[in-house]
Amino acid sequence: MMQRFGDPLERELRNAVGGDRLLLYDMVRYHMGWVDERGMESRSDPGKRLRPLLCLLACEAVSGDFRQALCAAAALELVHNFTLVHDDVMDGDRERRHRPTVWAIWGKSQAINAGDLLYSRGIESMAALAASGLAAEQALTAVRRLEQTCVEVIEGQFLDLEFEGRSDVGVDEYLVMIGKKSAALIACSLEIGALAGGAGPQAQRAFSAAGREMGLAFQIRDDMLGIWGDASVTGKPVGADVRRKKKTLPAIRAFELAGGEDLRGLRAIYSTPRPSGAQVATVLEIMKSLGVWEDVGRLAAEHAAAAAAALDALPVPEERRRAILGVLEFFVRRDA
């Protein structure tokens, strides 16, 4: 699918960012995987482009022509990358996609500027729907929907950071958080793709509902990879989220399932400023004994099944529905 969509999407993204030679734009192009840190053309990992892919698939499912949603797809990818640049600053991550992060090269203040530019270009690209043949009122609806989603993502990031200082976060609270931080933009991608393809409000809501369940399954799988992922594939060491004491779903479930000495051990390690390698190994052993991998995997499968059921109900041709289902299958089976 990305072979078919990739070149038109990349052209749209590059046009949306613009060609200004100010270093700020090279910082953005670097983050997007188009240039190296000297501003020279390079072929670095650009990321999965999953949100624009879903947008284009939804548009194609409704109208048969994915090109109607190209500027919307670019907008969604740019806004997603705005969140990544800012997340790297907040989390102190020095590497993304096997390269130094923007802030690690140019500093946190300039990285914030790069993120802000990605956000602004994203909103501008979504507004361009009005020039691509979509009615002005519908284009304004798409811009408003993206803005509402940005608020949700920011709320989710706030909650994620707040959870790091708490030991009493429950699964329900956590699902609310990832529903905002991760699932909201995936839901928005399918909804706006359907809108750009000419779907009515009811169909748009159906695409959004399917996307939200897909997003929950995606993030839960991401949580699993953040602890048990293959370091050679993910670019992060095994137990990376434990070392950072992130309250992801596996950690939450470990605290809920543990008792006695295991629970005391978890509390002690998660209250340590910087857990050692041996302490990370202890947490992984406790999680293994509690069956946390299997427990969390079941929840991911439940949300994937809910997403598949929602997709099955969409009034679109079967082969186009199967294409979106293929992305869902990737969400729950991916290893990076």
Image (spheres, grey):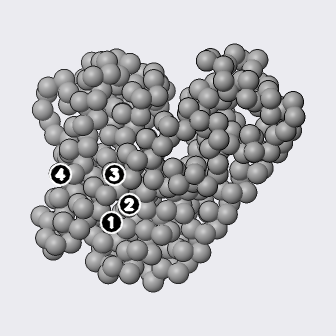
Say which label, 4 or 1, has the lower sequence index.
4
Say which label, 2 or 4, has the lower sequence index.
4
The relative height of residue 279 versus residue 7 in the rendered view (above or below) is above
User: Dot 1: what SS?
Assistant: helix
Q: Return the residue at label 4.
A: 124
Give the residue displayed 26% in from the left and 40% down from the top. 118
Q: Quadrant of residue 266?
A: top right
The relative height of residue 86 versus residue 148 in the rendered view (above or below) is above
Residue 225 visible somewhere in the drawing: no
User: Dot 4: what SS?
Assistant: helix
Q: CA distance from mark 3 to mark 2?
A: 15 Å
Q: Are marks 4 and 3 in contact (CB under 8 Å)?
A: no
Q: Are marks 3 and 2 in contact (CB under 8 Å)?
A: no
Give the residue displayed 73% in from the left and 29% down from the top. 267
Say which label, 3 or 2, has the lower sequence index.
3
- Front residue (pair 70, 282): 282
Give the residue displayed 20% in from the left and 31% down from the top. 25
